[in-house]
Amino acid sequence: MNTNDKLIKRINDLIDLSDKVLVTERRGSGSLSLSSVDNLVFTEFKNASLSFIMSLYGNKHPYYTNFENSCHRNTPYETKSGKGILNSIKTEIEEGWLNTLRGLVSSEIFVDFIEMAEHLLSENYKDAAAVMLGSVLEEHLRQLAIKNGLATSEVKGGKSIPKKADLLNSELTKDGVYNMLDQKNVIAWLDLRNKAAHGKYSEYTIAQVELMKQNIMDFIARNSL
């Protein structure tokens, strides 16, 4: 089963779950009472769907914010609203728009940020360049995870939060997306980024940041979206 098949299977499971929510509909008593659905099943549907959408698009995308705003009460109407959003996402996946758009946007962002990092290095701003390069690397790990059907978020305390880069690196290696040598290199690059972000400027040199830039560019080229 390829990645696209996995995504379609998962979204079909979520759509099936919405149907299971809808069959629990209970009509309210009185002319002004609203119908409701079972709260336990609805909550499962809502949280699982938000986690899935966040993994695909992030929490700023209209699909995520629309789902969050229109599917937060256990009513048949809001359940159907959530199901409609999932059906739209399913169409994008089936027609190949998801990977095409993601690849184009990621490539443009990658080029822009690499060029900014190169400018910073030319002006001897090694620390800002290291942080920027680390951000490019982390986003590429996240997009690689999505491409290969790996979750980029996890539920903690009832909330869906993004996984950290080191965890994504470990899971991508375990899934065979890239090898252990790449994993060790990513660990080193993330460590250099963290030193820059936490003010440990004397623990690395501009030459190491320049080498980091070249190696990250090579890593991304070999592990493309």
Image (spheres, rainbow, N blue to C red):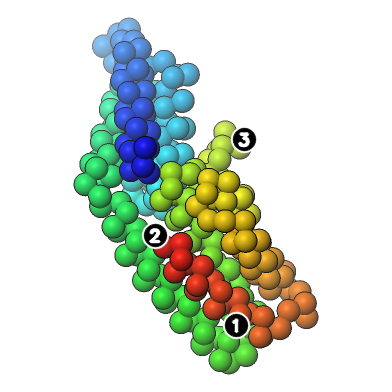
Tag shown at residue 157: 3
Q: Residues within 10 Å of mark 2 (few under 14, many from 20)?
A: some
- Name which of mark 3 and mark 2 comes first in the sequence: 3
C-alpha separation, residue under disc 1 versus residue under disc 2: 24 Å
C-alpha separation, residue under disc 3 versus residue under disc 2: 32 Å
| Rendered location of residue 122, percent (x, y) | 56, 91
The answer to whether residue 192 is seen in the rendering is yes
Residue beneath label 1, please? 210
| Rendered location of residue 74, percent (x, y) | 39, 23
Location of residue 166 (image quadrant)? bottom right
The answer to whether residue 197 is seen in the rendering is no
Tag shown at residue 142: none
Q: Secondary structure at mark 2?
A: loop
Picture quarter with the N terminus: top left
- Name which of mark 1 and mark 2 comes first in the sequence: 1
Residue beneath label 2, please? 225
| Rendered location of residue 160, percent (x, y) | 53, 40
Choose between 195 and 50: the one closer to the eye: 195
Q: Secondary structure at mark 1?
A: helix
Location of residue 76 (image quadrant)? top left
Residue at image position (74%, 74%) is: 199
Residue at the extreme top of the image, as rendered: 29
- Which amino acid does the dot numbered 1 rest on? Glu
Of circles 3 and 2, the one toward us is 2
Q: Residues within 10 Å of mark 3 (few under 14, many from 20)?
A: few
